[in-house]
């Protein structure tokens, strides 16, 4: 082998990695592909004619499944549906037994599958999720489907991973990457619109206010948090005047939260500050710069004080501020699933 061939191989590998900004982990990509291959084998072996992917976790699994299926000789795709079950609190808590499920009233958005615009009479149904930890969500989903569609020929469940492999997947932690948003506990997930993102932001903002005070919202609590953010910002600048974050985001430091503003203006300023913390975290991770200064910056957000601990809700709310960015994340995830399928199928 010529000396330059090894370098060329490294560059090719690097170029391949650059295409995957959300699915960066090559082991995850391998496991995803193998998991979908196994799912296809089950569908063929069990003669499954209907697949139900649970939002939001399993929708990206479908994107990969669809691309890999195209390369098989198994014929047309099975009938595909998406249902949002994992969000309903009662399902996560395992509060419903078979008797309680049978008593559920129609119209309950967290469990009324019979109102869905499709029928499974005589169908062989497989319910798919991305991760199975306790098995509770898939178990309850199966019971709900059996209750709502008693004339289905068969109803089974399958998860691509268990929690010993992956605790969290990129599309479950990156807003928008799954292509849907969980506005409520309704059976059908919602599209990534400005209206739906605003609803989530308002809910998270409300949770933050609740943490600020037990007795209801009052300006003094907001003023205290704003003042602490200002102090943290000043301390950070004095301690790390040449930190890459200061160079990159100088305008943010200059205009940060201002305790002299009115209540509404302080809220908006803190929301923008939370958005900055998200961008700063991404910047630190990508640049590989010293993170001690960043940890100091985050103290006000992650402090032990009860009011400050609620700042995590504000950071979550900030994640839903940019609808164009969130929609782009969904588009990017779909594209990476397509690239993954092509890459792996070509090497099989």
Image (spheres, helix red, strand yellow):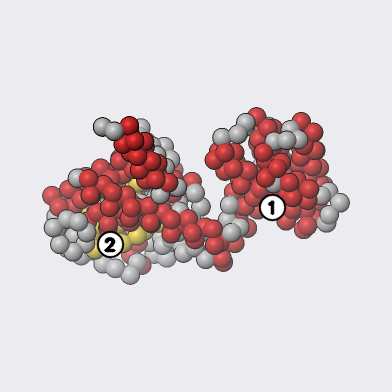
User: Horizontal placement of 56 versus 280: left or right?
Assistant: left
Q: Secondary structure at mark 1?
A: helix
Q: Can you see residue 90?
A: no
Name the residue rendered at 27%, 52% in the picture.
342
Foreground residue among 303 and 138: 303
Question: Which quadrant, please, contains the C terminus?
Answer: top left
Dot 1 surroundings within 10 Å: few (below 14), some, or many (20 or more)?
A: some
Residue 135 position, x and y percent, is 34, 41
Residue 84 position, x and y percent, is 40, 56
User: Horizontal placement of 53 versus 347: left or right?
Assistant: right
Disc 2 from disc 1: Cα separation: 40 Å
Q: Which residue is mark 2?
A: 80
User: In the figure, residue 237 lies in which quadrant?
Assistant: top right
Foreground residue among 174 and 97: 174
Name the residue rendered at 19%, 60% in the picture.
49
Q: Which residue is mark 1?
A: 272
């Amino acid at each position: 082998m010529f000396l330059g061939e090894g370098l060329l191989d490294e560059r090719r590998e690097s170029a391949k990695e650059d295409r995957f900004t959300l699915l960066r982990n090559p082991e995850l990509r391998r496991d995803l592909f193998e998991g979908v291959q196994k799912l296809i084998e089950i569908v063929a072996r069990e003669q499954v004619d209907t697949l139900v992917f649970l939002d939001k976790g399993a929708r990206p699994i479908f994107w990969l499944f669809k691309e890999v299926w195209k390369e098989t000789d198994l014929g047309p795709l099975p009938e595909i549906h998406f249902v949002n079950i994992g969000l309903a609190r009662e399902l996560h808590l395992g509060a419903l037994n078979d008797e309680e499920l049978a008593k559920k009233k129609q119209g309950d958005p967290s469990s009324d599958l019979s109102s869905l615009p499709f029928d499974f009479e005589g169908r062989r149904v497989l319910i798919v999720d991305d991760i199975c930890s306790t098995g509770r969500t898939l178990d309850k989903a199966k019971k709900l489907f059996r209750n709502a569609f008693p004339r289905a020929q068969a109803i089974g469940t399958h998860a691509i991973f268990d929690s010993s492999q992956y605790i969290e997947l990129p599309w479950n932690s990156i807003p928008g990457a799954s292509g849907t948003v969980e506005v409520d506990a309704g059976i059908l997930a919602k599209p990534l619109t400005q209206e739906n993102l605003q609803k989530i932001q308002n809910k998270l903002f409300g949770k933050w206010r609740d943490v600020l005070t037990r007795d209801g919202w009052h300006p003094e609590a907001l003023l205290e948090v704003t003042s602490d953010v200002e102090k943290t910002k000043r301390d950070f600048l004095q301690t790390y005047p040449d930190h890459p974050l200061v160079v990159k985001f100088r305008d943010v430091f200059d205009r940060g939260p201002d305790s002299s503003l009115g209540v509404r203006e302080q809220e908006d300023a803190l929301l923008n500050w939370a958005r900055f913390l998200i961008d700063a975290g991404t910047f630190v991770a990508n640049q590989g710069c010293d993170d001690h200064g960043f940890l100091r910056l985050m103290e006000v957000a992650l402090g032990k004080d009860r009011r400050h601990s609620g700042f995590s809700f504000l950071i979550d709310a900030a994640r839903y501020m940019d609808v164009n960015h969130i929609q782009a994340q969904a588009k990017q995830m779909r594209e990476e699933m397509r690239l993954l399928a092509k890459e792996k199928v070509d090497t099989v």
